[in-house]
Amino acid sequence: MYLVHGADHNVMIFKLLSNNLDADQPVYGLQAKGLNGIDEPLGTVEEMAAHYISEILKSNPKGPYTLAGYSFGGVIAFEMARQLLAQNKDVKRVVLLDSYVYPNYYSSNITAKKIAKTKYRMAMVVFMTKTMFSSKANFDRRIQLFKDGIKNTYLKLKLGKENQHKLVNSWPYKLDQMHNKAVDSYQILPLDIKVDLLRVAENDIFYAHDTELLGWRPIATKGVNKHEIPGNHINMLSPPNDKKLGRILQNILDS
């Protein structure tokens, strides 16, 4: 199984998960190019997918391949499946770890993308307001996020965007810039495959226009196998959720 990084670009978040898979289950992590601050980051999702495929083929030229991705990594894994199938390679499974297809991914038109992003942000504000008052824990979390947002805005004005980024993130500022550019320009196209979507049970952190299948229904045209996993988008890879997630994922691979 080849695991693709999320928006923090690092594969070390998968270490605990890999420990909870069977001892004879091979797992490889695909880390973002440019994370070391030396290599030039890639500018499109298609380039990311092609680069990771080239790394895979060096050690496993014949396949078959099982691809998985966390968060935005699921979108990259899906694009990798497209490119591998175009090369007549055998893709056994595509596993999406709470990966969401944002509405602006569906279109290639710049104006349509901007409209979709604006609508999503407005819906997100409504969602956050509702969930904020659903429990004390959610209220405290939203207040803390609000405080963090004010602090980050202040630091950006005081220090500049790049210096503020260095204070709060462990990856290079340029990597984030290139990643955001890639996300903004990407159009996801339907593919005639079935995917496995591992959806968190606690889905009260981020708004989704499709709470059931996270936008994958029109994209994976052979269907979406949905599996519920413990935790939320942030803590699903952390103890004790890592153990349960590992069992669920291993059962999917074994089947």
Image (cartoon, helix red, strand yellow):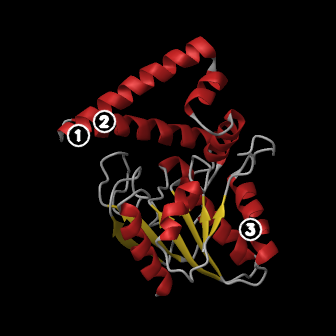
Q: Amino acid at mark 1?
A: Ala
Compared across the picture, whether 174 is left or right of 233 comes to right
Q: Secondary structure at mark 3?
A: helix
Residue matched to label 1:
137
Q: CA distance from mark 2 to mark 3?
A: 39 Å
Q: Inspect this view and state whether residue 232 appears.
A: yes
Please name the residue shown 54% across and 37% down the image: 114
In this view of the protein, which residue sits in the foreground, 107 or 63? 63
Mark 2 in CB contact with mark 3 (< 8 angstroms): no
Mark 1 in CB contact with mark 2 (< 8 angstroms): yes
| Residue 99 spot, x, y in % from top left | 48, 58
Q: Amino acid at mark 2?
A: Arg
Bin the neighbour count of mark 2 within 10 Å (Cα to Cα): few under 14, some 14-19, many 20 and up.
some
Question: Which numbered tag is attached to residue 141?
Answer: 2
Q: Secondary structure at mark 2?
A: helix
Q: Which is more foreground, mark 3 or mark 1? A: 1
Looking at the image, tell me whether mark 3 or mark 1 is earlier in sequence order: 3
Q: CA distance from mark 3 to mark 1?
A: 42 Å
Q: Inspect this view and state whether residue 106 appears.
A: no
Question: Which numbered tag is attached to residue 53?
Answer: 3
In this view of the protein, which residue sits in the foreground, 74 or 79? 74
Please name the residue shown 44% across and 25% down the image: 149
In this view of the protein, which residue sits in the foreground, 77 or 114? 77
Instruction: Please tell me in which quadrant of the rendered image residue 98 appears.
Output: bottom left
Q: Quadrant of the N terminus?
A: bottom right
